[in-house]
Image (tube, grey):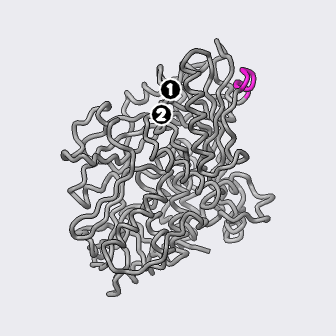
Amino acid sequence: MATLSAETRRCALDRLASDEPLDLLVIGGGVTGAGVALDAATRGLRVALVEKDDLAAGTSRWSSKLVHGGLRYLAKGEIRIARESAVERHHLMTAIAPHLIAPLRQIIPDRGGRQSAVIRVGLRAGDVLRRNAGTSDSLLPPPSRLSALETLGRCPAVSPDGLRGGISAADGQLIDDARLVIALARTAAGYGALICTRVRAERVDGRGATLTDRQTGERFDVGARMVVNATGVWSGGIDDGIAVYPSRGTHLVVDAARLGNPGAALMSPLGGSVSRFVFAIPAQLGRVYVGLTDVAAPGPIPDVPTPDESEIDFLLDAINPALARPLDRSDIVGTFAGLRPLVDTRGGGGGGGRDADALADVSRQHHIGVRGDGLVSVLGGKLTTYRRMAQDAVDAALATTDLAAGDCVTTTTPLVGAVRSPREQGLPPSLVQRFGGEAPAVVDAATIDRPLDPIVPGIDVTRAEIEFAMTHEGALDADDILHRRTRIGLVRRDADAARPEIERIVGEVLG
């Protein structure tokens, strides 16, 4: 079993501090960096990943939790990105992480008119990409028409006024984006990669870096034949030749009961658009995520982005026309925002001063850059295409050396938990959703009392998961567990309720 813990971290740092050079040093512990580490490790390379905070501490935990087929890019004529999205979605849902991704029905209320007709055409075009990627109808059903009654049955909060029915499509939904990153890092560790969190990289070039253990203050140099900068929106701090234009995407968190406990995602077109939607997506822990904004975010890059008041107002104003009972601020139990690392490959300096219209012209295609000293930077793209980004980054890094390596095999490499276990039966469904075939191991590894009890009443995260986060998933403290191994921390009241017992278990494990 691939294991990350405080002990494996110490051992990995001891090995890094030795004089033996790495084949590849990866800087950044988000989905792309973890994907690079896994890709390189499965090619037989000696790999280490360092992250200044925790795994999934940055943009990778602030997504919409969708593994989508690129319909929006298709509408904009970006065929290559749309096709790549559909192919990568197929790999994720069928081979890499089928345990973490479930089909999600998306429903667009149909009130007649040209807009609905054009949307139906667009969905059929997107379905062509699904079929071309090889994804079966049984996994992701093709678009269909729903009656008004069926639409209200799945999305009870929809306004019935003028409702003719619904336009139904399907896409992939992650149980949690941060859990995907943890699974990638653990799988990479299982193939021999060294995973080191709380380690800052400085004086980075194409052949190594100076590392500082933020836990102890120890500082040492590490040599590597290749270095990949996978720090996303922070890439300019490693390579000042990269022009990043951060775009902020904000979500609201609402109790699912407030929207009738929907069984599908509600998609509402923005104004008269046929390609941009605001959505209300049912999520784990009895929540619904309402999103998504896309606004320029110039200036210093914060560790934890926060939405501004205008974004909250925008999302409420955008979703409420579709609802029978409008949401207001009292319905919001949490918010989260992430920064997309958009790259302007046309040049022209840093990211300040871009307005939203200009930002829309910056491509969502990922970017691989190779500096003169061999440093490879990978950024842009999106969560769905992380695997392709990682493959391209490792290929680019190998091209700077004469190092021999195996072929990329990550399209068929399952992550921990992807292989189903008959012992999943009888375990809490929420536990199986988050761990897949590894769920029985979470319970078997528990040493605390009452392992299957919820951490606190009303939150379906078991006590065993808290211990497992420390002993197998690399969590070092209660914040790692609240905000990244689980998503309890997205709602402040839930975090406040769960923190005391989580801290008690953490102390017990560390003690």
Q: Position of residue 22 (x, y in %)?
A: 36, 80
Establish if 111 lies above or below 445.
Answer: above
Question: Which mark, residue 274?
Answer: 1
Disc 2 to disc 1, C-alpha distance: 8 Å
From this viewpoint, which residue is outermost toward the top? 162
Side of 238 relative to 282 (left or right): left
Q: Amino acid at mark 2?
A: Ala
Q: Are marks 2 and 1 in contact (CB under 8 Å)?
A: yes
Establish if 368 lies above or below 319.
Answer: below
* Residue interval drawn in magenta: 146-153
Side of 322 relative to 419 (left or right): left
Residue 456 in sight from this viewpoint: no
Front-most of residues 395 and 15: 395
Residue at image coords 67%, 44%:
140
Label 1 sits on a secondary structure element that is: loop
Q: Position of residue 254 (x, y in %)?
A: 56, 34
Residue 485 in sight from this viewpoint: yes
- Write down the quadrant of residue 121 in the picture: top right
Of labels 2 and 1, earlier in sequence is 2
From this viewpoint, which residue is outermost toward the bottom? 19
Question: Which mark, residue 75?
Answer: 2
Residue at image coords 69%, 52%:
430
